[in-house]
């Protein structure tokens, strides 16, 4: 994510039958051998204790959404069927859901009891669910959180003059649909959108079918790659789909209101160069297609919704030397944050630090870093970041240990953006450019389609480099003071004053980094 502000048919049975793989037992809901207990109401995230849920692993979502009229502010309704595997014997389990209402719930086709407890949908099946057994839960007739007019922040979805889009990071997708809303539990998705003729439905993945019935059109997409719920994209409204020439076999699809296409599309054209650039640095693009979704508005942030990064029109009023590195930031997330998801939200530096690294590197390699970041070289840029290191740590916490869960300026703070990129610069200084580039490719290969922790990154860095990096990386990621920079013993940090821990953060060095 970048920010410029302070800073209705079910999926076919053939699809669902192959989801669990041969290792998953199929049979009665409860086969005995384990005493059933309730699944945890949270997945165990330090920053978001009730986000996600314990006791099961989601394999697939079949999400069906209805838009009865051409009104971007309408309340969205839908059904979802979730296919999952129990990781313990379950007497009951939770889904994350903050929406307005639920019609009914069924587990394995049988009506189940449910209660609401805040953003927890607590479900009790008729019979316990046995450990390692696959099961389905269907939530029918749910209504999403009403869209508040003039809301200062999106509740999972955003109203535009042309329709609605999703912006679920980090914890808002469950305001739209019931889910296990944490990146540790990635899954595949089938997404169907039914809307009046004249409105278009666009989602993650590949278009499967489009059918018309009466005055409505149902559009179905299939995301067969692992997707974290926070990165779902459902754009429904008067949006046009525009295709560019593929890059190394990667189709490029942009989604823009037709009335803005002539203005916006030429400004996004550099994304083709950026795909080729990122593939040269970290390997093959990990999904079926890429592109940009541009809405008419001023969100103040961009978001790497999987396969279709979200921007508002304010970004496209920027000079191209500013816009292009921001576009590359969101593209880089598709390796770092999308394909490889954070194990917990304290690991968000892995997303934002890497995206900022490739944002700044792209600007440097294009020769625009002086205009973009006010520095002639990478060393000059990161020397300036280094000087702010102790202030950032005092204000926001260590790089891999944000102090609070508030989104703006707490989780998505300058110390996970520029500070995270500084960690990568220090690591490259420590292990050398060649080992660093090998590590980057190894990381996105080893953990493709999985969530991974900061400790996983430390372990892989040690293995690739042949160095024992635990102490070095622990100091950089978890220390309250900025460690010495390898190769630059003369670099110094600005002393921390009492005001630095309470005042607004220093302005970011680049247009896209250091903010949510």
Image: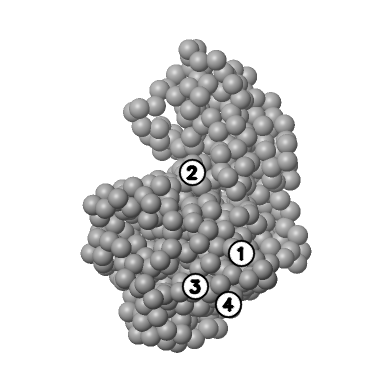
x and y, in percent, of residue 150 in the image: 75, 67
- Point out the frontmost of discs 2 and 1: 1
Q: Residues within 10 Å of mark 1 (few under 14, many from 20)?
A: many
Q: Quadrant of residue 252?
A: bottom left
Q: Secondary structure at mark 3?
A: loop
Q: Distance between the Cα atoms at labels 2 and 1?
A: 27 Å
Q: Nearer the viewer, residue 116 or 189?
A: 116
Give SS at disc 1. Answer: helix
| Tag 4 residue | 507
Of the two numbered discs 4 and 2 on the same chain, state the one appearing first in sequence: 2
Circle nearer the N terminus (3, 2): 2
Report if the CB atoms under discs 4 and 2 are less than 8 Å apart.
Answer: no
Tell me the SS state at disc 4. Answer: loop
Q: Which class describes the residues within 10 Å of circle 4: few (<14), some (14-19), or many (20+)?
A: some
Q: Which mark is nearer the camera, 4 or 2?
A: 4
Alpha carbon separation for disc pair 4 and 3: 16 Å
Residue 114 in sight here: yes
Q: On screen, 17 above or below 89?
A: below
Q: Residues within 10 Å of mark 2 (few under 14, many from 20)?
A: many
Q: Check the image and report above or below for 257 versus 172.
A: below
Pinpoint residue 273: horizontal percent, then vertical percent: 33, 75
Tell me which corner region of the image, top left, top right, bottom left or bottom right, holds residue 70. Answer: bottom right
> How far apart are the two marked residues, 4 and 2, measured between alpha carbons?
32 Å
């Amino acid at each position: 994510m970048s920010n410029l502000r302070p800073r209705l048919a079910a999926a076919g049975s053939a699809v669902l039958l192959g989801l669990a793989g041969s290792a998953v037992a199929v049979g009665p809901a409860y086969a005995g051998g384990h005493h059933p207990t309730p699944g945890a109401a949270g997945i165990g995230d330090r920053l978001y204790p009730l986000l996600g849920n314990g006791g099961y692993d989601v394999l697939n979502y079949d999400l069906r959404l209805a838009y009865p009229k051409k009104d971007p502010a309408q309340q969205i309704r839908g059904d979802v069927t979730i296919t999952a595997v129990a990781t313990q014997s379950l007497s009951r389990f939770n889904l994350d859901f903050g929406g307005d209402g639920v019609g009914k719930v069924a587990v394995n086709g049988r009506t189940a009891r449910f209660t609401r407890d805040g953003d927890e949908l607590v479900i009790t099946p008729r019979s316990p669910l046995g450990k390692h057994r696959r099961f389905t839960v269907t939530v029918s007739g749910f209504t999403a959180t009403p869209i508040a007019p003039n809301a200062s922040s999106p509740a999972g979805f955003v109203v535009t003059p042309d329709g609605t889009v999703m912006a679920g990071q980090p914890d808002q997708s469950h305001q739209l649909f019931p889910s296990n809303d944490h990146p540790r539990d990635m899954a595949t998705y089938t997404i169907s959108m039914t809307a009046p003729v004249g409105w278009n439905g666009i989602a993650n993945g590949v278009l499967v079918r489009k059918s018309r019935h009466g005055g409505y059109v149902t559009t179905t997409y299939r995301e067969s790659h692992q997707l974290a719920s926070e990165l779902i994209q459902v754009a429904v409204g008067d949006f046009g789909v525009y295709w560019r020439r593929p890059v190394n076999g990667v189709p490029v699809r942009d989604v823009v209101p037709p009335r803005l296409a002539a203005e916006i599309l030429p400004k996004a054209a550099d994304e083709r160069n950026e795909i080729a650039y990122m593939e040269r640095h970290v390997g093959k693009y990990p999904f079926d297609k890429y592109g940009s979704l541009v809405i008419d508005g001023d969100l103040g942030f961009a978001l790497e919704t999987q396969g279709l990064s979200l921007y508002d029109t304010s970004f496209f009023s920027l000079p191209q030397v500013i816009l292009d590195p921001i576009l590359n930031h969101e593209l880089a997330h598709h390796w770092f944050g999308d394909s490889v998801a954070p194990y917990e939200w304290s690991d968000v530096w892995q997303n934002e630090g890497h995206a900022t690294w490739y944002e700044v590197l792209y600007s440097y390699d294009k020769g625009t870093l002086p205009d973009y970041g006010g520095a002639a070289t990478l060393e000059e840029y990161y020397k300036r970041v280094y000087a702010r290191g102790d202030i950032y740590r005092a204000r926001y916490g260590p790089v891999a240990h944000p102090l609070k869960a508030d989104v703006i300026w707490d989780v998505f703070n300058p110390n996970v953006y520029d500070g995270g990129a500084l960690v990568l610069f220090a690591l490259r200084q420590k292990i050398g450019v060649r080992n660093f580039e090998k590590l980057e490719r190894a990381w996105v290969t080893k953990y493709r389609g999985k969530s991974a922790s900061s400790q996983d990154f430390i372990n892989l860095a040690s293995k690739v480099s042949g160095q024992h990096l635990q102490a070095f990386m622990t100091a950089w990621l978890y220390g309250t003071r900025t460690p010495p920079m390898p190769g630059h013993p003369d670099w110094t940090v600005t002393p921390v004053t009492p005001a630095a821990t309470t005042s607004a953060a220093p302005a970011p060095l680049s247009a896209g980094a250091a903010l949510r």
